[in-house]
Amino acid sequence: MSTPTDAEAITYIRAINLALDDALAADDSVIVFGEDVGIPNGPFGASKGLRAAYGDRVFDTPISESAMIGAALGSSMAGLRPVVEVMYADFLLVAMDQIVNQVANTRYVSRGRLTAPMVIRTQQGSTPGSCAQHSQSLEALFAHIPGLRVAVPSTPQDAYSVLRGAISSDDPVMVFESRRLYPSKGHVRRDADARIGVADVVRQGSAVTVVTWGTSRPLCEEAVDSLALQGYECELIDLRWISPWDTETVLASAARTGRLVVVHEAVRNAGFGAEVVSTVAESLGGQLQACRRVGTLASPIPSSPVLSAQLLPSVDTITRAILDTIGEK
Amino acid sequence: MMAAEVDDYRDMLRIRLIEEELLKCVQDGRVIGSAHLCIGQEAIPVGACRALKSDDPVVATYRGHGWALAKGVPPVQFIGEVMGRDSTLNGGRGGSAYLSSPDHAFMGENSIVGGGLPMTLGLAMAHQRRATGLIPAVSIGDGAMNQGNVHESLNMGSVLGIPFIVIVENNGYAEMTPSTDLTATPAAVRAAAYAIEAIEVDGNSASAVAEATRRARELAISTQRPVMVEAHTRRLGGHYSGDAQAYRPKGELEEWGRLDPLTRARSLLDPTVAEATYQQVVAEVADAFARAAQLPAPLEEEAMKHVYAN
């Protein structure tokens, strides 16, 4: 396959493809598998060309998420570095035992004598017409589980770097990609910082700290850029990872601004935004003057875009939440 | 031949005596929590581990004490782990139902019914790719045959051509309900649905289980697929240590007790040899419990370690 030059913008899905390609080339112990991942080149094209390039290190499995994730676990315990693709995050739910009871406990219970250096790649979020079983944003469920690492990249660069970091990690990592952002383009440097748990400060500002990740980042950028034209300079932080998450960067920013808005596409109730807000509140106490959470309203997500638009975060709801914390209408 | 029969008796007896003492420990508080004992099923791990290579990885269930000991886990450390001590196994993190010892290729018990099957498929995938020549084996109960994990793993192992051995210990009860009330077709019958070989065996004879496992191992290698061994046995105790077993029909335990593999194994031996072996194991087990009781408690400051790599 031709590889892009650093100057060439590539799509988010191509960045994932490139990360898988580079990881397979760099380390013989890396294998890539999942439903339609091998010969069909991946349902979204993430593994395009990889079967041809790497043979049976890239292969198709039955539609059996539990056995797929358990197979990743067992093969990682025995020295491989598997990357398993789960087509939609919603399908993780049929394999919860393997993820939560099996994968997450491996290192702790054996005191590190057994480990699970494996990656579960999946994608999530609502797109117009997707039904309630193909629309959920589920990262908070897994951030709740000790032993798992969780990433939610939002740009082509982060999609590349997060995946390389995840594959190198000696811990099990779940990467939640954004289907809606798959066509979005950006420049990817292959030597960019791939450290786990480091946030990206997207915009600097002193009025309000806005924390986001995944699919919501472009909405936040639009809201923050528009408010900047009105004279409100917001600091926008993309966490990239929610387990572990960059408390240091968020706390330092919130200490400066005294105002915090957390935005995610996942349902707001008991979402990871609640964890971010409470961590900041516990640490800053009265220094935190105002905070808001923006997330999907507590409802299953309907297929019709007319209905789903009523529930999902938007530039408008994000803008209003930011202005609320400033006390402006 | 005699030597093998003495070995079988001694190894089964060791498991039996350790578990009988552990039951007392649960009752008098030396073990905190409960235990799931394999009393009556000892011939399966002892026989199977005779046939497996010592490095063949084994995955078991919460009824896995026999498997750990048959893989060569030292009794003192095993007992210490069950007692929640700082053992060399899991340092008190595993306990009775979730202990492991990779140094002995014992990849661990599993407290989720059927939960170890997908992991075994993965172990087998890695060993096949790395051409180690090892064949992983997993023990499950008859109740696990109704878990989706088992179905998914046997199908995937079959279509992807992954060799491993699944040993179904059919002990008559799925937890507290007779297996026949819960299972539409026997395990060995289901094997055909996955296009894999199945061998049924008398699970109360260690030599028969060893022979079946030897054949299964060869078949796994020659077919490059999973192979099932359904070992018919009888659970001579409760589902767990606190199980009053009120669900058992009157007289069943007495009837099943006549099939006790230990009684059978002893009857094959010269009485003098049998008694000498018995006394030797009694002394060995007493010594192991005494030494396990001397193991220190885990250090409190260890509790948060090893959640992540760093």
Image (cartoon, coloured by chain):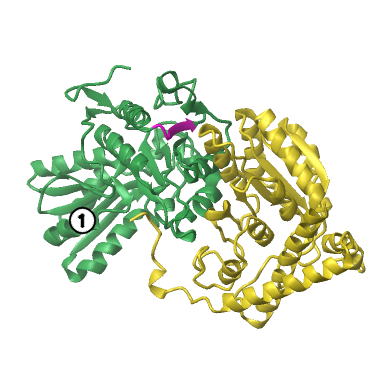
Q: Is residue B62 left or right of residue A12?
A: right
Q: Nearer the viewer, residue A123 or B116?
A: B116
Q: Is residue B40 left or right of residue B250?
A: left
Q: Residue at x 45, y 32 (%)?
A: A31
x then y, percent, for residue A141: 44, 52
On whether residue A5 falls in the magenta region, the answer is: no
Q: Residue at x 14, y 49 (%)?
A: A234
Query: Image quadrant of residue B308?
Result: bottom left
x then y, percent, for residue B260: 85, 62
Quarter of the picture containing the C terminus of chain B is bottom left
Q: Nearer the viewer, residue B48 or A156?
A: B48
x then y, percent, for residue A167: 36, 40
Q: Is residue A286 left or right of residue B195?
A: left
Q: Amino acid at mark 1?
A: Val
Q: Identify the element where label 1 is drawn.
A: helix
**Callout 1 crowding tier (Cα within 10 Å): few <14, some 14–19, many ≥20:** many
Q: Is residue B241 left or right of residue B302?
A: right
